[in-house]
Image (cartoon, grey):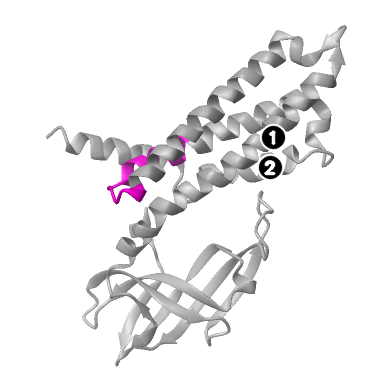
Amino acid sequence: DPNQMQTIAVPDGDDFVISGRKWIITTYRDAAFHIVMTQTRNPAGEDLGATMFVVDAGAEGLREIRQIEMLDDMFPGGHSEVELENVRVTPDRILGEVGKGFRYAQVRLCPARLTHCMRWLGAAERCHDVAVKHAGWRTAFGKPIGRHQGVSFQLADNMMDLHHCRLAVRHAAWLLDQGEEARDESSMCKVYCSEKLGDVVDRSLQILGGMGTSDDFPVMRIYKNIRAFRLYDGPSEVHRWALSRNLLKTQR
């Protein structure tokens, strides 16, 4: 729930002073500047909505508390917990307008979700290709394991899930390209792809057997990293809640 954000920017003359704490800030150590989303209050303490500010790396009052050990390891620089203590920013550091931070974030999120889907679609296809090759030469009980129904059905399920994810991404991307409102479509695509592509990678690892959990194959690393896909840019449960909410609005 973004309305529970605790980082606050309060006016001080023409400037704003930001205080709060942020978790899982990706590549914090390598950034030259940061975009900080905050609650914004006027001098009377009234809520003005969320605002984005540009804060330079090394700004006074900005510091890293720790680097957080995460399941995924695909981002250079890792993920940090960051504290902002009375970080002063001038009016020219406001990104856009005061109170419109959530609106700007939503504009970014629709295409960003699709780029995640595209990236993980490619990674899941890679895992499937590895599993198909393995199933063709690895033998058990007198024949390649791909000839056994337990493995062949998993390969067939992978084919169907990959195909449907491609269609979902293409349709949502086409809507965005046409300038259509694609909020719900990007949510559906993100949920569907994050879960189905995770299944593809999981089946691929299962087909590889014990060696699938080793770094002899790329599947192990992709398996670790794709799990987080169901969480970032909105967990599946939040997207389902939002989709059903929007659906019920049309029934009034």
Give neighbour class at mark 2: few <14, some 14-19, many 20+ (Cα, 10 Å): many
Question: Cβ–Cβ below 8 Å for labels 2 and 1?
Answer: yes
Task: Identify which residue, 179 or 243, lies in the foreground.
Answer: 179
In the displayed structure image, the side of residue 99 where residue 153 appears, left or right: right
Residue 240 location, quadrant: top left
Residue 186 is at least partly visible in this image: no
**Residue 135, how many percent across, how many down?**
78, 21
Image coordinates for residue 182, horizontal then vertical, percent: 32, 46
User: Residue 157: x percent and y percent?
Assistant: 59, 20
Q: Secondary structure at mark 1?
A: helix
Q: Earlier in the sequence, mark 2 or mark 1?
A: 1
- Residue 149, located in which quarter of the rendered image? top right
Residue type at mark 2 is Ile
Q: Residue furthest top?
A: 142
Q: Which residues are magenta?
A: 176-192
The residue positioned 49% from the left and 77% from the top of the image is 84
Asked whether, in this view, residue 201 is left or right of residue 174, the answer is right
**Circle 1 Cα neighbour tier, 10 Å, few/some/many (<14 / 14–19 / ≥20):** many
Residue 159 seen = yes
Mark 2 lies on residue: 222
Q: Is residue 63 left or right of residue 186?
A: right
Cα distance, mark 2 to mark 1? Answer: 8 Å
Is 179 in the magenta?
yes
Residue type beneath disc 1: Cys
Q: Residue at x 39, y 41 (%)?
A: 172
Helix, strand or loop for the magenta stretch, by majority: helix
| Residue 200 within the segment the image draws in magenta | no
> Which residue lies under the disc numbered 1?
127
Quarter occupied by the C terminus: top left
Residue beneath the point at 21% across and 34% down? 248
